[in-house]
Image (cartoon, rainbow, N blue to C red):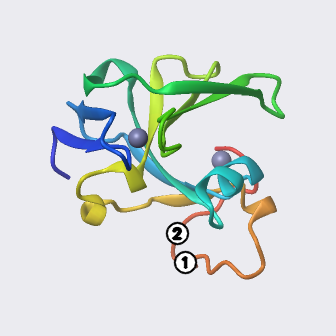
C-alpha cells in the first residue's frame, strides 16, 4: 500500500492527501452505504482523521443516528455529491476514506465484509473474506 496517497471528488473541487496507510479496509453492506454508494456496498479505508489534509475544498457533512446510539457522519462534495469520507462518534480519531475517491484505487485490498445482515441477495460476497453480520 502506498502512503501518502491522494484522492478527490468527481468535479475536482475537493482534493485530499492521506499520510498513512489504512489500518483496515472493509466492505460495508449497511443500507446507508448502499444508498449513498449507488451499489451493494461501500469500500472504506480506516485511517486517522489527522492523517488527512486538504489541498483544495472542504467537504459537506451529513450526520445520522446509528443503530448503536452513536452518530455516524458522511462527508461529500457539495457541488458534485461525490462521497469522500465517513466516521462516527464511536471512533472520533478515525475516519473512513471511500475507496472510490482515490486517484488510484487499484491497490485497495478489502479485509472483510461488515453489516452482511443487510447485504443484497444479488451481491456476490467473496467467501474467502471474514464476515460480520453487523459492525465489527
Ligand atoms: Zn466535487
Ligand atoms: Zn455502511
Nearer to us in this view, 45 or 134: 45
Numbered tag placed on residue 37 in the rendering: none
- Would you identify the image quadrant in which residue 66 lies? top right
Q: Could you tell me residue 106's position as x and y percent?
A: 27, 66
Nearer to us in this view, 95 or 6: 6
Q: Could you tell me residue 124's position as x and y percent?
A: 62, 81
Numbered tag placed on residue 126 in the rendering: 1
State which quarter of the image contains the C terminus: top right
**Left or right of 88 on screen, residue 60:** left
Q: Residues within 10 Å of mark 2 (few under 14, many from 20)?
A: few
**Left or right of 132 on screen, residue 42:** left
Query: Residue drawn 76% across and 53% down?
Result: 31
Q: Are marks 2 and 1 in contact (CB under 8 Å)?
A: yes
Nearer to us in this view, 33 or 108: 33
**Left or right of 76 on screen, residue 58:** left
Nearer to us in this view, 101 or 124: 101
Q: Could you tell me residue 122's position as x and y percent?
A: 72, 82
Q: Could you tell me residue 85's position as x and y percent?
A: 48, 36
Badge 1 marks a residue whose secondary structure is loop
- Would you identify the image quadrant in which residue 17 lies? top left
- Above-or-below relation of 3 to 104: above
Query: Residue drawn 82% across and 23% down?
Result: 69
Q: Which residue is mark 2?
A: 129
**Left or right of 132 on screen, residue 69:** right
Give the CA separation, mark 2 to mark 1: 6 Å
Amino acid at each position: 500500500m502506498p502512503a501518502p496517497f491522494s484522492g478527490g471528488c468527481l468535479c475536482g473541487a475537493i482534493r485530499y492527501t492521506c499520510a498513512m496507510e489504512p489500518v483496515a479496509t472493509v466492505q460495508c453492506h449497511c443500507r446507508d452505504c448502499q444508498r449513498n454508494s449507488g451499489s451493494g456496498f461501500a469500500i472504506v479505508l480506516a485511517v486517522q482523521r489527522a492523517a488527512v489534509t486538504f489541498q483544495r475544498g472542504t467537504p459537506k457533512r451529513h450526520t445520522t443516528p446509528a443503530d448503536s446510539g452513536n452518530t455516524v457522519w458522511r462527508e461529500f462534495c457539495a457541488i458534485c455529491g461525490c462521497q469522500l469520507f465517513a466516521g462516527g462518534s464511536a471512533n472520533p480519531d478515525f475516519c473512513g476514506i471511500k475507496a472510490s475517491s482515490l486517484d488510484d484505487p487499484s491497490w485497495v485490498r478489502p479485509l472483510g465484509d461488515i453489516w452482511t445482515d443487510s447485504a443484497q441477495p444479488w451481491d456476490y460476497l467473496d467467501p474467502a473474506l471474514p464476515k460480520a453480520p453487523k459492525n465489527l
